[in-house]
Amino acid sequence: MKKTVLILLQLLLCQAGMRAWEPVGDHIRTSWAAEVSPENVLPEYPRPQMIRNEWLNLNGLWDYSITAADEAYAGPDGKILVPFCIESSLSGVGKRVGQENALWYEREFTVPRAWKEKHVLLHFGAVDWHAQVWVNGIKVGEHKGGYTPFSFNVTPYLKARGKQVIRLRVWDASDQSWQPRGKQMEKTNTIWYTPVTGIWQTVWLEPVGKARIERFLAVSDIDKNQFSFSVETTGLEATDKVTVEILEGATGYDAFSPGTAVLASAEVTDGKAVLQLDRLHRWTPDDPYLYGVRISVTRGGKVLDKVTGYTAARRISVRKDYKPDRNMKAYMRLALNDRRMVMFGLLDQGWWPDGLYTAPTDKALEFDILKTREWGFNTIRKHVKVEPARWYYHCDRLGIIVWQDMPNMGDHDKWCCDTRPPEMAKAQFNQWSMGSLLGGTDCDVPEEWKENFYREWGEVIDNFKCFPCILVWTPFNEAWGQFDTRKVVQFTKEKDPTRLVNESAGGNYELCGDIHAVHHYAAPAMNSFEWKMANVISEYGGLGFPVPGHTWVEEANWGYGKTLGSGDEVLELYDKFARMLEIYMSVGCTGAIYTQTTDVEIEVNGIMTYDRQVVKLDEKRLREINRRVIESSIAHTFKH
């Protein structure tokens, strides 16, 4: 009898636990949403560029509460599924927070016994926007910025045994203040979407030694067949050795295998090492070859720390066309590995109907990239959002070029001015010189927020320049929050001199970067041109077609220009635009970005629906058109 009662009690507790989370809301979802559960939520290793064997994933159900911004935590309101933001369906909550409130998280964890002699790092992939962290009631630190990873060494705050408690307070003003926030807006409409507040990437623990590797960066020189490494370490003694190895094609956990072929190795001196190879296998979209990397710290022959990662050999540049005739004008072209290349791709916003900023699974995260490749594109413009590290890893290994935007901290949309402080609304209404070299003005950004922009943009570059797929940085889009363009471009180049800078996509040009990027909807047009820069059309298209049963809302869907009635109509017009692009490519255009990969909320101008259930266009014909555009400017080695 007692046994039966115990079993029934266990079943009831199990059912109660199952009811503790379920998706909320009545919007559409992706098919991957059905694979999400508190026991199986984004279990993949979150840092593919620097892997250690041991780690503990803290994704899952956490307690949460919403309080007034000036109130302390007073206990949970319920459960939230981390790492989905509180506004999302997959969080299980679906509530907005707003700048007048704070969002609190709390959960328990146990440190594995095997970590007893280790330092324990607490990692957050990304938290939007201002995060303060306590462990066992003691504040361990804080971070401002919604798009970059941060961590704390929590070892001094851990109890000797038993349950440990993490508490997190998050404050986020979204578009009601000047922090970078991309397309988030309290008053959603057209191209502006639901706010994202709180944890939206994986939270995890990592055991490390006192002497350890903090970060590394590899830069290739394709002329000398070399890789130059910068390795940051901490806790080392004078006699410790740091060794870097380049491995033949082994990435991730494969690189831990002792049987992996080592192509070159070198000892790190003063944080630097140069590794010489006989030849470099160059990375391209058609051949995305990755070299494995293994870095070790040893003391007296004993390995104190070991990480694995990967790198690639490639060079991005802007080069002049070869002129067979002295009367012929030489255009500036984008070049990958010194070969002329048309970079043709999609504007990818990275939003999900069920997770908002967070893809429901890693397969979902990979899916959009795979489809972009299948459709014949070679480039993605990651639009005013920064993705988790695994997204860039997928681009690296699948062979997709990335143009990376900085999330904007402003806009000039009068739609929202009634929800913002009047002084802020006024400061954002700068003049956007769309497609013109004249007439643009800066936003009146307060100095505090200029400094914050530099800090956050610097963190984005520092954390993601290790991914070979990123070839272009774009600090400003369409004058949204734009200020001091020349200084920002110089800052970007100093942070990363190995990549190109698209100074200002769509207008307000200072002609101080490498790329001159125009926007024109719906048909593409080169309505501005600069002879000394690479010229691209970094937005066009946006052809709207709502697919019944697969839209965020039933009515009031939106796209650029006239809403079309079928995929065939869209494809017919898409092909006409492609033929226009071919003409532009022959007279100096060197890249183009079509809007966009998927529908997003009320925008219905995606090649796919928001739920990724329907591809609107005939995929075979779409690929043929796209390959034709790319091949319209045949790659060749530039003459000097």
Image (spheres, rainbow, N blue to C red):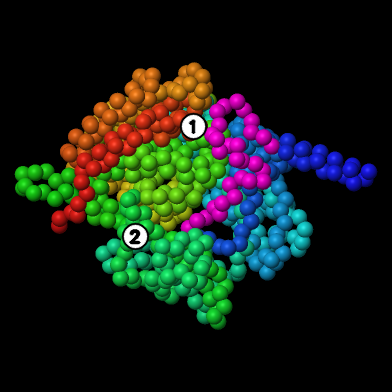
Local secondary structure at mark 2: loop
Main secondary structure type of the part rendered in magenta = loop
Question: In this image, 240 relative to 493: left or right?
Answer: right
* Residue at position x 32%, y 51% in the image: 286
Q: Classify 608 as above or below 227.
A: above
Local secondary structure at mark 1: loop
Could you classify mark 1 by the number of other residues whose Cα lies within 10 Å: few (under 14), some (14-19), or many (20 or more)?
A: few
Separation (CA) of disc 2 from disc 1: 36 Å
Q: Which amino acid, mark 2?
A: Ala
In primary-sequence order, the first of circles 2 and 1 is: 2
Q: Which amino acid, mark 1?
A: Gln
Q: Position of residue 559 (x, y in %)?
A: 40, 24
Q: Residue furthest right?
A: 1
The quadrant of the picture occupied by the C terminus is bottom left
* Residue 36 among those drawn in magenta: yes
Q: Position of residue 441 (x, y in %)?
A: 33, 34
Which labelled disc corresponds to residue 313? 2
Which labelled disc corresponds to residue 613? 1
Q: Position of residue 165 (x, y in %)?
A: 72, 52
Question: In this image, 39 relative to 187: left or right?
Answer: right
* Residue at position x 43%, y 26% in the image: 604
* Residue at position x 29%, y 25% in the image: 573
Q: Classify 83 as above or below 545.
A: below
Could you classify mark 2 by the number of other residues whose Cα lies within 10 Å: few (under 14), some (14-19), or many (20 or more)?
A: many
* Residue 357 among those drawn in magenta: no
Q: Which residues are magenta?
A: 21-49
* Residue at position x 14%, y 50% in the image: 322
The quadrant where residue 23 appears: top right
The quadrant where residue 474 appears: top left
* Foreground residue among 345 and 234: 345
